[in-house]
Amino acid sequence: MSRSVLIGITGIDGCGKGYITDKIAIDLNQQGMKVASIKVKRKILSSGFLNFIQAMVIIVIILQIVLVRTEEVNSSIATSGTIVRLDPRLDQLVPQGAVLEKLAEGFTWVEGPVWNREGGYLLFSDIPGNSVFKWKEEEGVSLYLKPSGYSGPVPFKGKEPGSNGLTFDSTGRLVLCEHGDRRVSRLEKNGTKTTLADRYEGKRLNSPNDLVFKSTGDLYFTDPPFGLPETFNDPAKELPFQGVYRLSAGGKLTLLTKDIKAPNGIAFSPDEKILYVTDVDPKRSAWLVFDVKDDGTITNGRVFYDAMPFTKRMKGAPDGLKVDINGNLFAAGPGGVYVFSPDGTHLGTILTGVPTSNVGWGNDGSVLYITASDSIYRIKLNTKGKGF
């Protein structure tokens, strides 16, 4: 949100005399204020009156900034839960009257929502808190796992030590992307962890971010450096790239691509012939798409949808995503969840009003759980996730 304010302004010319200009335009926005234009000095003033005018100008500027900031906060509250409908096809997915319900709040930065079908509950990561939490209807939130992503003997130096993306394998075991321990792990039934992948060609992974299983049992995951204390420039970073990998059911790790600056969210189309990957590179944020070859590798990488217009207007970046049974994408991003058809049409947006990190199917498959900033949400849809 921005506003132009016209006010008078005073100053001292090169000879030490006070003057007042014509009115100037000041643009107020989230970053503060910016002078848009200044006209020439017009009138010589006495020093006493000049000081009075200067004081009044400062008061006006402060009041205008407070007003704009207050309106921005109110606007954010008002838009949370709004469904922006850009295409009639959205009505087939998100029913008229659908309500975005906040289930829990007060965390730091939540991620990785995943539904446990056997137990009927949601798990999600609080990355800075190095924890996985559980939410269940009628019971609310409880701590499920801590530490979730960093188990080192000394305090973690960075901001994001914990687990990020979460999923379940075919036997119901929780699989985690761990930032601090720089690995993909599996939580066994007895509470111990098994490392599934932590090195590529002898070098430590950066900090695995998100993951998805293929029906073959192969695990695909992204590996940006956001869990490292200094991210891309961290001295402990061993790999000179950020990769997308496939871990075969037999345990072989294959690098699929190293051409994405900051790979993040990852998901398959229903027929598993398409792999979606998000790139949060601030210079080219986008939802990307690859063709999946018969041997499980990927080819023909291209932009599915450009996220730059959204990242320039709102805080956040393209992040985690899920695909429904018909191939429609529900993609977390700046300010909400973006809904795309398989042909790349932006059908609409479920607004949260804050940076939104990920989504996950739950209940009977028709409920979409959303992690956004410090809160957990859900919304009932007309569609379902695959496998429900």
Image (spheres, grey):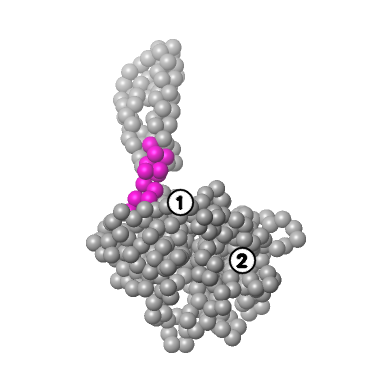
Identified at 49% across, 84% down, the residue is 216
| Residue 172, position as x, y percentages in the image | 56, 74
Q: Position of residue 52 (x, y in %)?
A: 42, 15
Q: Amino acid at mark 2?
A: Glu
Asked whether, in this view, residue 311 is left or right of residue 95, the answer is right
Which contiguous range is marked in magenta? 71-83
Judge by depth and name the residue closer to the eye, 378 or 130.
Answer: 378
Q: Which residue is at the front of the view, 293 or 50?
A: 293
Mark 1 is on which residue type? Lys
Left or right placement of residue 156 versus residue 1 in this view:
right
Query: Label 2 belongs to which residue?
Result: 178
Q: Which residue is mark 1?
A: 102
Query: In which quadrant is the N terminus drawn?
Result: top left
Residue 73 falls inside the magenta stretch: yes
Q: Is residue 291 visible?
A: no
- Secondary structure of the residue carrying tag 1 is strand
Residue count near mark 2 (Cα–Cα under 10 Å), binned few <14, some 14–19, many ≥20? many
Q: Residue at x 44, y 12 (%)?
A: 48
